[in-house]
Amino acid sequence: MPDQATLVIIKPDAIKRGLAGAVLSRLEPLQLEIIGAKVMTVGRPLAEQHYQHIKGKPFFEETVEHLLGVRHGVSSVLAFVLWGPDAIERVRQVTGATSPEKADPMSIRGSLGRITTSGLMENVLHASSSPEEAARELRMWFRPEELLRPLPVR
């Protein structure tokens, strides 16, 4: 199991509901090192770049607005980088499926996420899906000097 870095973003819906601590406590047993963390407001260019893989889909704008906090009245996220053996897959397993309704009830999204009565999906957090995506996302969200260790070059 190689050491790797993965991006985790606690989204505005979780910040509004006071779930940041609950999310962190579910990730803590993985014993991965936090090598970077920041609370930040997300601008539209970053949100659109982050979700470029779904540009053109009917739910693109709603997804961007979710990350911007437009739909929840909270404009901040907690973004952090976890480092350790097989970090990407291990975090994804704890995170659960994208949709809270399809996620394992013991996962973070399955237990803390929800679909609101208006149909808005609140899936609490983002976690990088692959080494390639992690490398792309980490370059977008963090400058090298913001991290406690250098990331592998991709």
Image (tube, grey):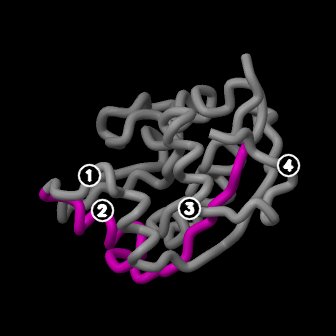
Q: Alpha carbon of mark 4 to alpha carbon of mark 2: how far?
A: 31 Å
Q: Are marks 1 and 2 in contact (CB under 8 Å)?
A: yes
Range covered by the magenta-colored residues:
58-82
Query: In the structure shown, which secondary structural element does the residue marked by tag 1 occupy?
Result: helix
Labels 1 and 2: the sequence-earlier one: 1
Rendered residue at 23%/68% (across/down): 61
Residue indicated by mark 4: 149
Query: In the structure shown, which secondary structural element does the residue marked by tag 4 occupy?
Result: loop
Residue type, numbered disc 4: Arg
Viewer-proximal residue, 63 or 117?
A: 63
Residue 16 within the segment the image draws in magenta: no
Residue 63 left/right relative to 142: left
- Residue 56 horizontal/vertical position (percent): 16, 57
Rendered residue at 64%/42% (across/down): 6
Labels 3 and 4: the sequence-earlier one: 3
Labels 4 and 2: the sequence-earlier one: 2
Residue 122 left/right relative to 143: left
Q: Residue 140: give its label.
A: 3
Q: Residues within 10 Å of mark 4 (few under 14, many from 20)?
A: few
Q: Alpha carbon of mark 4 to alpha carbon of mark 1: how far?
A: 31 Å
Labels 4 and 1: the sequence-earlier one: 1
Residue indicated by mark 2: 63
